[in-house]
Amino acid sequence: MKWWRQRRTYVIIFVLTVCVIGGTMGGILFYQMQSRKGEGAEMVNELTKTSKHHPVSYSPILEWEKDVQAVFYEVEFFSSVPFFLDDNSESTAAIYRTRRVYQNRYNPPLQKFAGDLLGKKPLYWRVRSMDFDGQPLTPFSKPAELWTSPDIAPMNAPLLVTEYNGEKGRALLYPVYHWVQQAGAKSYEVALYHENPKLNEQAQPFATMFADMSELYDTAPRPLPQGFYWRVLSFDGEGNVMGKWSEPQYYKVSPLDHWEVGVLGDSISHGGGHFSFGPADFEFSYLSYLDFSAVNLSQSGDTAQMTRDRFEKDVLPFKPHYLLIMTGSNSLRAGEDPQLVIACLQDIQQKCLENGIAPILLTLPAINPDNIQHIFKEGTAPDYARRFQRVNDFIRTQVYIDTAAAFNCPADKLPTEYALDGLHPDANGKKLMAQRINAAWPQVKGLADRMLIHYQNEE
């Protein structure tokens, strides 16, 4: 009997143990399945791949697939992959985390938080997309291994990431310089040269500019017939030089290339949107989606008067046969008299005709004052809709393309799905605008030509 009682006790203990382990494992599996449900959004993909035999430096550039819906990215690093890792939540096991990543490339300060692990064992990292208010747009990516080696040269200069090669949407009279910043950099110098400074170390810049972020809008037009070279140098918080100059990049937007089509306007035409994307992100330029090439003569921040006043300086050197014109949004939302905007458009039309250029007006897309206030903290004239309507009514009596009609705008407000900031259409909005232009282009070219011929005959 004693033997039987002992055996029964062992059996009970065994069964209870199995139940506990099974329950625990079942709970773990359930937790992991639940943590991966997310909100239906896809994870960020195409993270930089490394391995023991293909490591990166102690100061690498990590990359991943660009998300045009993201305003910024959150990146986490781990010394090992945690057993419990929720795809939809920050992890307390992370040894480093940052939300200050505004492009799909990042130079992490590995030696700052993982110096004793570098070159010895892999780190792990993951990334997710975030919206303007700091809420996740996607789950975290699956953790990626990060192998490092002291034998590979670290990032020692900014990496220029924008290629202005003259293709569709990539010819801007007013350049926007964009690069990957070095970890710890607080300011930058951007220098422009007539010759390649890498080939001639004695070359002196003809223009020098400074920035406190890894993007710089040039306020001067650069219509240089032979193009120019630009490069960037980083500085730390005390103003000391960090590393060396970046590799130079060539830039050319030349009147000698005989552009048939030009685009003149403000930031809607210059490019950018969704708060953190600029003209160097070509997905946010409607020129990128046109069926024909065009030189971008637009400048961010323009009012209607500013666009008109730079016509001689910026348009005449190129003298395109056709000029697409969209300006006035900044004026009207600030409360400017619609008749003044109309007068500026008429002045631009007249200047075009006098110089043998066929003008084509584009209607102004609606705006969303609530989103403008939320993103930019700027007010909008309360009767903005009436002002926009009056200008668009005029435009529709001219040779024009109805880009405003690309958007269904309940209550005269541009839907957030097409423009996060309420003013600049996002990538999907720019595609819709381009579709309108492409569809109208064969017919509107003929109308513009006939108008120009009629004017010349009248003269």
Image: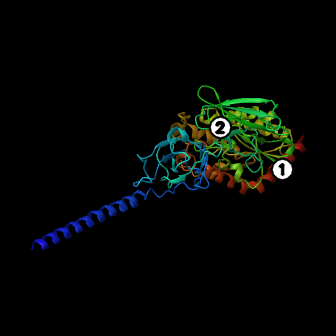
Q: Residues within 10 Å of mark 1 (few under 14, many from 20)?
A: some
Determine the residue located farthest toward the left in the rendered image.
Answer: 1
Quarter of the image for the N terminus: give it.
bottom left
Q: Residue 33, how many percent across, how many down?
A: 40, 61
Residue with the mark numbered 2? 215
SS of the residue under disc 2: strand
Q: Secondary structure at mark 1?
A: helix
* Three-letter amino acid code at the position of disc 1: Asp
Q: Which of the 4 image quadrants contains residue 172?
A: top right
Question: Camera-side residue: 441 or 117?
Answer: 117
Left or right, residue 99 beside residue 334: left
28 or 431, which is in the foreground?
28
Q: How is the image coloured?
A: rainbow
- Measured from the top left, where is residue 165 in percent x and y? 77, 47
Residue 150 percent across, percent down from the top left: 61, 45
Task: List the residue tagged with mark 1.
Answer: 449
Q: Answer yes or no: is residue 349 visible.
A: yes
